[in-house]
Protein backbone atom coordinates (compact mmCIF):
# COMPACT_ATOMS: atom_id res chain seq x y z
CA UNK A 1 0.00 0.00 0.00
CA UNK A 2 1.46 3.35 -1.02
CA UNK A 3 1.53 6.31 1.29
CA UNK A 4 -0.61 9.19 0.03
CA UNK A 5 1.20 12.53 -0.21
CA UNK A 6 -0.63 15.53 1.25
CA UNK A 7 0.54 17.81 -1.60
CA UNK A 8 0.98 17.51 -5.38
CA UNK A 9 4.55 16.40 -6.24
CA UNK A 10 5.90 19.83 -7.28
CA UNK A 11 4.44 21.48 -4.19
CA UNK A 12 5.84 18.71 -1.98
CA UNK A 13 9.31 19.30 -3.45
CA UNK A 14 9.14 23.05 -2.78
CA UNK A 15 7.95 22.55 0.81
CA UNK A 16 10.70 20.01 1.57
CA UNK A 17 13.40 22.22 -0.04
CA UNK A 18 12.23 25.31 1.85
CA UNK A 19 12.24 23.43 5.16
CA UNK A 20 15.69 22.00 4.48
CA UNK A 21 17.06 25.45 3.63
CA UNK A 22 15.23 27.09 6.54
CA UNK A 23 13.44 29.60 4.31
CA UNK A 24 9.89 30.67 3.60
CA UNK A 25 7.82 28.41 1.36
CA UNK A 26 7.08 30.29 -1.84
CA UNK A 27 4.35 28.81 -3.99
CA UNK A 28 3.06 30.06 -7.32
CA UNK A 29 -0.57 30.99 -7.87
CA UNK A 30 -1.04 27.71 -9.78
CA UNK A 31 0.40 25.68 -6.90
CA UNK A 32 -1.84 27.46 -4.41
CA UNK A 33 -4.82 26.73 -6.67
CA UNK A 34 -3.87 23.02 -6.69
CA UNK A 35 -4.09 23.10 -2.89
CA UNK A 36 -7.56 24.64 -3.07
CA UNK A 37 -6.57 28.21 -2.18
CA UNK A 38 -8.11 31.00 -4.24
CA UNK A 39 -7.23 34.71 -4.16
CA UNK A 40 -9.38 36.28 -1.47
CA UNK A 41 -9.56 39.55 0.41
CA UNK A 42 -7.57 39.08 3.67
CA UNK A 43 -10.25 40.79 5.77
CA UNK A 44 -12.86 38.36 4.42
CA UNK A 45 -10.53 35.44 5.18
CA UNK A 46 -10.20 36.64 8.78
CA UNK A 47 -13.99 36.98 9.04
CA UNK A 48 -14.41 33.42 7.76
CA UNK A 49 -11.84 32.18 10.30
CA UNK A 50 -13.68 33.94 13.15
CA UNK A 51 -17.01 32.47 12.01
CA UNK A 52 -15.45 28.99 11.99
CA UNK A 53 -13.96 29.60 15.44
CA UNK A 54 -17.40 30.51 16.79
CA UNK A 55 -19.22 27.60 15.18
CA UNK A 56 -20.62 29.66 12.30
CA UNK A 57 -22.59 31.96 14.61
CA UNK A 58 -22.18 35.63 13.62
CA UNK A 59 -23.67 36.85 16.90
CA UNK A 60 -21.00 34.93 18.80
CA UNK A 61 -18.30 36.54 16.64
CA UNK A 62 -19.60 39.98 17.68
CA UNK A 63 -19.57 38.87 21.33
CA UNK A 64 -16.09 37.33 21.11
CA UNK A 65 -14.37 37.27 24.49
CA UNK A 66 -10.82 36.79 23.20
CA UNK A 67 -9.42 40.32 22.85
CA UNK A 68 -5.91 38.82 23.08
CA UNK A 69 -6.42 37.14 19.69
CA UNK A 70 -4.40 38.84 16.93
CA UNK A 71 -7.48 38.76 14.69
CA UNK A 72 -9.88 40.26 17.26
CA UNK A 73 -9.97 43.80 15.75
CA UNK A 74 -10.77 42.38 12.30
CA UNK A 75 -13.44 39.86 13.37
CA UNK A 76 -16.36 41.90 12.02
CA UNK A 77 -15.00 41.87 8.47
CA UNK A 78 -13.69 45.45 8.52
CA UNK A 79 -10.27 47.01 9.09
CA UNK A 80 -10.71 49.29 12.10
CA UNK A 81 -7.37 50.99 11.38
CA UNK A 82 -8.17 52.13 7.84
CA UNK A 83 -9.56 55.47 8.99
CA UNK A 84 -12.67 55.02 6.87
CA UNK A 85 -16.14 54.73 8.29
CA UNK A 86 -18.67 52.77 6.29
CA UNK A 87 -18.37 52.79 2.50
CA UNK A 88 -17.44 56.46 2.01
CA UNK A 89 -13.93 56.84 0.61
CA UNK A 90 -13.89 60.61 1.10
CA UNK A 91 -13.92 62.87 4.13
CA UNK A 92 -17.37 64.09 5.12
CA UNK A 93 -17.65 67.52 6.74
CA UNK A 94 -20.15 67.72 9.62
CA UNK A 95 -23.20 69.85 8.78
CA UNK A 96 -22.74 73.46 9.84
CA UNK A 97 -18.96 73.30 10.22
CA UNK A 98 -16.91 75.87 8.29
CA UNK A 99 -15.25 74.87 5.03
CA UNK A 100 -11.42 74.94 5.19
CA UNK A 101 -8.85 74.88 2.42
CA UNK A 102 -5.81 72.56 2.34
CA UNK A 103 -3.78 74.82 4.67
CA UNK A 104 -6.48 74.63 7.36
CA UNK A 105 -7.38 78.31 6.89
CA UNK A 106 -10.99 79.31 6.43
CA UNK A 107 -11.24 80.88 2.94
CA UNK A 108 -12.53 84.41 2.54
CA UNK A 109 -16.21 84.18 1.75
CA UNK A 110 -18.29 87.05 0.38
CA UNK A 111 -21.23 86.13 2.64
CA UNK A 112 -18.97 86.32 5.75
CA UNK A 113 -17.45 89.61 4.57
CA UNK A 114 -20.90 91.16 4.07
CA UNK A 115 -21.97 90.02 7.54
CA UNK A 116 -18.82 91.56 9.06
CA UNK A 117 -19.44 94.87 7.23
CA UNK A 118 -23.09 94.98 8.33
CA UNK A 119 -22.25 94.84 12.04
Image: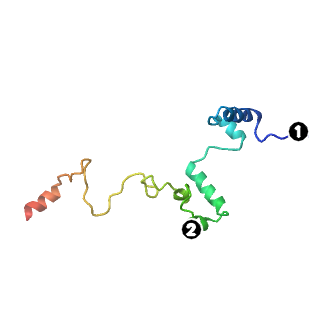
As drawn, is 84 to the left or to the right of 78?
left
Name the image quarter holding the N terminus: top right
Q: Is residue 77 visible?
A: no
- Which residue is depicted at the point 66% across and 59% down? 52
Q: Position of residue 34 (x, y in %)?
A: 72, 39
Element marked by disc 2: loop
Q: Earlier in the sequence, mark 2 or mark 1?
A: 1
Residue 43: x and y in percent read 55, 52
Element at label 1: loop
Q: Quadrant of residue 12?
A: top right
Quadrant containing the C terminus in the rendered view:
bottom left
Identify the residue shown where x is 56% and y is 58%.
69
As measured in the structure, the alpha-carbon distance from the residue carrying label 2 to the one carrying label 1 is 47 Å
Q: Give the mark toward the camera: 2 or 1.
A: 1
Viewer-closest of 103 and 119:
103
Residue under label 1: 2
Q: Where is mark 2, residue-wise?
A: 63
Q: How many marks?
A: 2
Q: Quadrant of residue 33?
A: top right
Q: Is residue 1 left or right of residue 97?
A: right
Res. 55 in view? yes
Give x and y (percent) for residue 9.
77, 34
Q: Which mark is residue 16?
A: none
Mark 2–mark 1 CB contact (< 8 Å) = no
Neighbours of disc 1 within 10 Å: few (<14), some (14-19), many (20+): few
Amino acid sequence: MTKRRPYPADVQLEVVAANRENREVQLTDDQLAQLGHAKRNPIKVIRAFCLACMGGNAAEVRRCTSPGCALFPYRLGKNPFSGRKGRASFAVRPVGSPIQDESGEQPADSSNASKAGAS
